[in-house]
Image: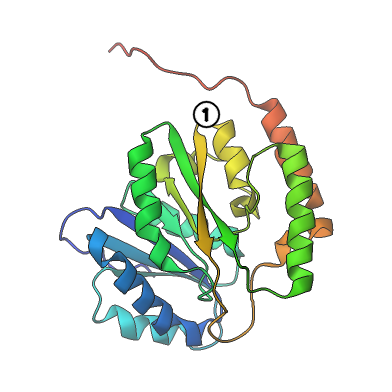
Amino acid sequence: MTEPVPSAGPPRLSIVVPVRNEAGNIAPLVGDIENACSAIAPFEVIYVDDGSSDGTAAALAELAGSRPWLRIVRHAQSCGQSAAVRSGVRVATAQIVATLDGDGQNDPSFLPAMLAQLEAAGPGVGLIQGQRVGRKDTGFKRFQSRIANKVRGAVLKDATRDTGCGLKCFRREAYLALPYFDALHRFMPALVVREGYAVAHHDVRDRQRLTGVSNYGFFDRLWVGMLDLMGVWWLIRRRKRVPQIVAEAR
């Protein structure tokens, strides 16, 4: 189900939030997004409910009744975080899209600055990748992420120390040009460069999860992501020069 788009003019930014069983985090995070993005209105927030079995759908429906900029997309069954992000981007109506995780750990107060950075950078930059400082995950998970990021950086040479950060701001057309596969969101910097765009970075503050336990986020484990890493490496090596159209005749 997709809620109708408000008719107050095209939004400057579409914010996509993938969630699965995050009922307790919906209202606080929606409030944080609303406060953070009031200065960049008009905007829209697209929550993608990835087959939740708790009260997530009801919490979203209640908030959407008083917030015309809040849209809801619901998957019939869980398809994973990358699929949820893709569903949101496909229905987004702004030319620039931002993503953040639905557990409250990503601070939406960084979104206006990331949007301004992308707008100022010009069309050659396709992605502003958030990079977390002061991470609030467990020590073991931080260790896993550190090793995985070092291996990924050595193989892909994507010059990004934290591709797993959910805070990203990118051009919608750049994202839709990427080859889709599960865990795409964790390899976006390398794949955006593959499409001929530059990538810039923005340090962001990590927060504690508001409530509940993680339903996504296990893909930063090195032994789980190795096949995808090799697949992305192959895709980059197989990419030919990106065509630059200089003229078009009728």
Residue at screen point 48% across, 83% down? 25
Position of the N terminus, as image quadrant, is bottom left
Query: Quick check: 194 above or below 127?
Result: above
User: Quick one: 72 or 236, which is closer to the camera?
Assistant: 236
Residue that extends furthest to the left in the rendered view of this protein: 8
Question: Whole-percent x and y of residue 202?
Answer: 49, 51
> Residue 42 versus residue 39: which sits nearer the camera?
39
Q: Position of residue 172 (x, y in %)?
A: 41, 45
In the rendered image, residue 128, in percent from the top left (x then y), is placed at 47, 47
Give the residue type that dot 1 points to.
Gly
Residue at image x 72%, y 75%?
Answer: 138
Q: Can the viewer see residue 231?
A: no
Q: Nearer the viewer, residue 192 or 81?
A: 192
Q: Looking at the figure, which quarter contains the C terminus?
A: top left
**Local crowd size for mark 1, using a 10 Å CA cut-off: few (<14), some (14–19), many (≥20):** some
Residue 156 visible in image = yes
Q: Is residue 181 left or right of residue 98?
A: right
Using residue 23 as the reference point, say whether residue 138 is left or right of it: right
Query: What's the coloring here?
Result: rainbow
Judge from the rendering whether residue 237 lies leftward or rightward of residue 116; answer left or right: right
| SS of the residue under disc 1 | loop
The answer to whether residue 222 is above or below residue 141 is above
Looking at the image, residue 136 lies above or below residue 230 = below
State the residue position of label 1. 196
